[in-house]
Amino acid sequence: MKRISTTLITCIALIVASTVYSENDKARTMYGQKNAIFAGSIFLRGHDASTKKLLDDKDIKLFASVLKKNNIKYAYLFAGPFSKTGDLPEYPFTSLARENLSKLKQYYPELILLPWIGGIQNKQVFLNDKNWTSNAVNSIKKLIDYLPVDGILLDFEYMLIKEKGLIKGTREREKIWREEYGNNLNLFHRMVREKLPDIFIATVVTSTAPGTKPWKYSEIRQLSEYVNQMSFLYYDTNIHDENEFIANLNYQIADLKKLKKEINNKKIQYLIALGTFENQKNLRKYRDMRYENIPYTLKQLKYAILQNTEKTRLVDGITIYCFWETDEKEWQELYTYWLNGNI
């Protein structure tokens, strides 16, 4: 009788342990590892744009090593912004830029390199101007043809606050521009896809959660038809209430669930972007670091994923903004709370 009881207890323990392991393993597989990071122009310029510090081979090797160690699959390398005529700057079109990117590929062959271009609507970007959009699309093709890269990251912004150099219209004109912006943005992405049908296209969008001043949901659904990867920004939310922060994050994940079911492009990756930036005084209104810190955001993100996930992975990875302000402590937090997950 004693042997039977012991055997029974052992079997129960194994079943419980197996169930716990299975649930944990299932949870980890829901935390996608198609992770990305915003990086500066230094890898294309050959020097830091602010400090003028020269890039050397050790810097390139270290960059590749850090990304590989931390499960970063995509590097967005700044190659912009556009000019008012739709042209890109000269620095990505140099032999030095090509050489540096080739070295990055040597040190980390699996890394997907995506030039990061875009700008602010009515400052560097004029999506409502047919001549500008045509020239910008041609500039992208020239860049893709020149650099040893896998595709492009498109990062356009429509500023809701005052910005130096921003062209302002009458209140009525501003209203029309705002209403037209989503369709113009979709059209531009479609033009890039038609011009370059085989490249990897990533894009950045604001959160669809209602507390973060989103675009219309239908516009993002259409945008999904033209891209391979979409990063939803869940920082600078201007949310200062814990319950509201959590509710909006859950709303965002639930929205991804709807998108995954509806879109025709089944291979698209949806990423959640979080910040590792310095909390500048003029932006503290938008960044409440009680909630937008790495451990808290990622813990809540995992809870939201598990609450909404059935069989389909909803979040394919995280996007980190930005490499040049991510310190050793933040890398450790990112690794602990996300980057050590299963692929």
Image: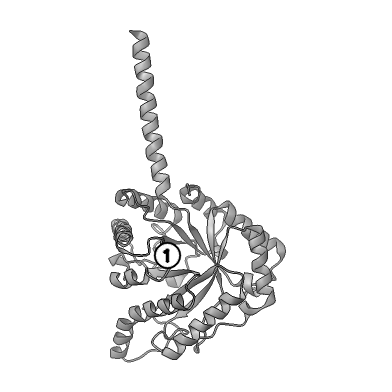
Q: Please rate how many residues cluster around mark 1, counting C-alpha atoms within 10 Å: few if below 14, some from 14 to 19, many from 20.
A: many
Q: Is residue 307 above or below residue 7?
A: below
Q: Is residue 216 visible?
A: no
> What residue does disc 1 label?
231
Q: Residue at x 63, y 62 (%)?
A: 105
On-image quarter of the N terminus? top left
Q: Residue at x 52, y 55 (%)?
A: 330
Residue lying furthest top: 1
Q: Is residue 340 left or right of residue 298?
A: right
Picture coordinates of residue 13 (x, y %)? 37, 24
Q: Quadrant of residue 261?
A: bottom left
Picture coordinates of residue 133 (x, y %)? 45, 85
Q: Residue at x 41, y 62 (%)?
A: 268
Depth order, front residue of 108/191: 191
Label 1 residue SS? strand
Residue lying furthest right: 57
Picture coordinates of residue 319 (x, y %)? 47, 61
Q: Quadrant of residue 260?
A: bottom left
